[in-house]
Image (cartoon, grey):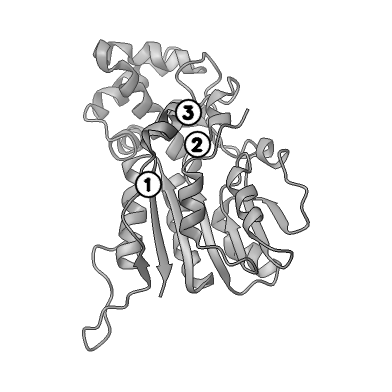
Amino acid sequence: MYHNPVLLKESIIGLNINPNGIYVDATFGGGGHSIEILNKLNSSGRLIAFDQDQDAIDNKILDKRVSLVKSNFKYLNNYLNYFQINKIDGLLADFGISSYQIDNEKRGFSTRFDSELDMRMNNSQKTDAKAVVNDYKKDQLEYIFKNFGELKNYKRITEKIISERTNKYIDTTYDLKIILKSLTIPKEENKFFAKVFQAIRIEVNDELEVIKTLLDKSLKYLKKGGRLVCISYHSLEDRLVKKFIQNGGFRNETSSDLYGNKDLKLKKIGKMITPSEKEIIINNRSRSAKLRIAERI
């Protein structure tokens, strides 16, 4: 079951919706944000929504103003071109994993269930978590746990996995947890495994690169005054969004012309927004969410 959309009111306000406008919901999920966008549009407005998960596609909205695309949002340009859309008024992206995916025992995203190591957001792709854990080389695993999980003991984690997988194929989430349990401190066990699973999940779905691709492509389609609204759930995602809003790219400095004038592409709107205590009580998943809003210059 899909849970309440995170930071719903704040993200819709951030979009500053034009009733006649064209909007993109890059992460359809349960459709909560899309429904609220449609509520703000008149009969001339339009919404293009993306999701690569068939379970989300099955949750489609029956409304002639919305086109729901089964695809990764990194293909934004392909589909906007297909729909003959040159400019959009706003783009909303709620990054990370949906509550439905976490709570589905068969998907392998959660540390709570003993399930097959899968973690694919697109369940038709080939590479899954089993392939990462069982087939990746030492340097690849170290890179993942160091950079995507921000785990200090990434070398020991890698050594444990490589040592154990020579004796037995690592097939389930509990297989992996049993192998790594000796590396945890009891009071920090949940946090440790959350980071391990995050690292593998990011690799399986190439999450950071597809976010960068989406943000880059958004600049081409956002019209002047159009809004970019992004919800992130961990520091790796949020740093990308923050840097992009500041610099219009992912370098540490904004590019300049021959005269030293900075080539600003976006204007930050307000401060970073986090959920209220009331929202966190209602929807615990929202507790780590960070919302950033920018406007195309």
Amino acid type shown at disc 1: Glu
Image location (x, y in percent) of residue 15: 50, 60
Viewer-nearest of discs 1 and 3: 3
Looking at the image, residue 77 lies above or below residue 108: below
How many other residues sit within 10 Å of disc 2, few (<14), some (14-19) or many (≥20)? some
Amino acid type shown at disc 3: Ile
Q: Is residue 213 left or right of residue 125?
A: left
**Quarter holding residue 3:** top right
Task: Provide the residue designation for mark 2.
Answer: 97
Looking at the image, residue 96 lies above or below residue 294: above
* For the residues bearing labels 1 and 3, Cβ distance under 8 angstroms: no
- Nearest the viewer among 164 and 16 is 16
Distance from label 3 to label 2 (Cα)?
Answer: 18 Å
Q: Residue at horizontal 45%, vertical 19%?
A: 111
Task: Provide the residue designation for mark 1.
Answer: 237
Task: Provide the residue designation for mark 3.
Answer: 282
Viewer-nearest of discs 3 and 2: 3
Q: Residue at horizontal 28%, vertical 11%?
A: 182
Q: Earlier in the sequence, mark 1 or mark 2?
A: 2
**Quarter holding residue 1:** top right
Amino acid type shown at disc 2: Ile
How many other residues sit within 10 Å of disc 1, few (<14), some (14-19) or many (≥20)? some
Secondary structure category for the residue under label 3: helix
Looking at the image, residue 248 lies above or below residue 115: below
Q: Is residue 108 left or right of residue 203?
A: right
Distance from label 1 to label 3 (Cα)?
Answer: 24 Å
- Nearest the viewer among 157 and 207 is 207
Image location (x, y in percent) of residue 288: 36, 36
